[in-house]
């Protein structure tokens, strides 16, 4: 039986599914899913199992193509932002040593288009948490309040020439809707290792479930108004709001500043500055990184976090506010 780790269990089954092939040039699937944008995809024998909304999906990369259990090519292309002109985006980055190193290291990394409620709820849960803890919270929320979905395994004939064998069916749990969370209690949510975040998640879920906040209609707002409206929600500050803007609303100028990014900015862009507050950093990033600042942020973040982890020889990551 496959060991799928955090959120996914398996059952023994012999039937299998044929994989659709989708062109995906200039894309690194593993790097994108491991870059701290989201926390529920699991590596399964070289591929990944997760959910896109309420749809269970298996996906693997083969060269410049994706092989996936999802037959809806439009859904896959949209979710993984395969339409983003990545070469043009990267060419728009500032020409400086820190950015150049990050761009080279993160080649093929794309900013995923996440479901709005799932993204908002996940980042509310992320405050002051390590990546491993966020994954645990996501898994517990999905298992306790989400819905069960199944994916038959990919055909052995399409899996790198492996011989036919008994294969597992993948069991995936979707992220619970705002309505389902709203029906729970703070006590129940605390059982998912949320701590004080349970109160904020519950309050925001009830606002969304009661239509006091329509996440879909917020799309029409300007960046300034969208950020301000998100910050009115329980558990959402500027850093979480910028993450939601970037990953759920595709506001590619949004530049979340967490401890990793603040460290990069201070060390690489303001090495001699004595007085450097959040307002000054935010103003600098908006002007300096421009229209694709969110992509620049993600590249700087992933490069800094990954290289630091390699130097330490361990995978401990501290999360503050955003991640």
Image (cartoon, rainbow, N blue to C red):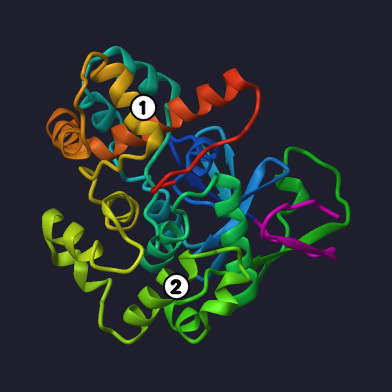
Which residue does the image show at 43% across and 32% down from the upper left? 108
Which residue does the image show at 73% across and 38% down from the upper left? 160
Q: Is residue 112 left or right of residue 217?
A: right
| Quarter of the rendering containing residue 210 | bottom left
Q: Which element carries disc 1, helix, strand or loop?
A: helix
Label 1 to label 2, Cα distance in Å?
A: 30 Å
Q: Is residue 291 left or right of residue 58?
A: left
Which residue does the image show at 55% across and 45% down from the upper left? 131
Q: Nearer the viewer, residue 61 or 186?
A: 186
Q: Nearer the viewer, residue 43 or 119?
A: 119
Residue 53 x/y as whole percent: 47, 67
Magenta segment includes 16: yes
Q: Which residue is mark 1?
A: 263
Query: Predominant secondary structure in magenta?
Result: loop
| Quarter of the rendering containing residue 300 | top left
Label drawn at residue 199: 2
Q: Is residue 228 above or below residue 200?
A: above
Magenta segment includes 125: no
Residue 105 x/y as whole percent: 44, 22
Which residue does the image show at 53% across and 40% down from the upper left? 34
Q: Nearer the viewer, residue 133 or 275?
A: 275
- Residues rendered magenta in the picture: 1-18
């Amino acid at each position: 039986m496959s060991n799928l780790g955090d959120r996914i269990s398996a059952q023994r089954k012999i039937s299998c599914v044929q994989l659709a092939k989708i062109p995906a040039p200039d894309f690194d699937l593993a790097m994108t899913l491991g870059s701290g944008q989201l926390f529920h995809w699991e590596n399964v024998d070289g591929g990944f199992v997760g959910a896109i909304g309420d749809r269970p999906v298996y996906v693997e990369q083969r060269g410049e193509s994706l092989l996936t259990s999802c037959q809806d090519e439009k859904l896959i292309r949209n979710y993984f932002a395969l339409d983003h002109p990545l070469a043009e985006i990267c060419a728009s980055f500032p020409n400086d040593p820190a950015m150049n190193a990050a761009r080279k290291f993160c080649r093929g990394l794309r900013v995923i288009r996440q479901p709005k409620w799932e993204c908002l709820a996940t980042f509310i849960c992320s405050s002051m948490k390590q990546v491993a803890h966020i994954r645990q919270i996501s898994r517990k929320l999905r298992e306790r309040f989400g819905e069960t979905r199944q994916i038959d395994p990919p055909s052995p004939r399409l899996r790198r020439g492996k011989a036919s064998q008994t294969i597992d069916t993948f069991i995936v749990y979707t992220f619970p809707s705002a309505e389902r969370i709203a029906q729970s209690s703070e006590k129940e949510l605390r059982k998912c290792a949320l701590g004080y975040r349970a109160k904020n998640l519950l309050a925001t879920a009830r606002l969304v479930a009661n239509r006091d906040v329509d996440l879909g209609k917020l799309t029409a707002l300007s960046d300034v108004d969208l950020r301000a409206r998100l910050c009115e929600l329980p558990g959402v500050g500027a850093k979480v709001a910028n993450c939601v803007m970037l990953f759920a609303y595709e506001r590619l100028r949004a530049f979340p500043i967490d401890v990793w990014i603040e460290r990069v900015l201070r060390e690489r862009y303001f090495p001699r500055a004595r007085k450097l507050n959040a307002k000054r950093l935010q103003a600098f990033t908006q002007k300096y990184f421009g229209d694709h600042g969110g992509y620049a942020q993600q590249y700087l973040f992933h490069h800094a976090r990954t290289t630091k982890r390699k130097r330490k020889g361990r995978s401990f990551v501290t999360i503050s506010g955003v991640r």
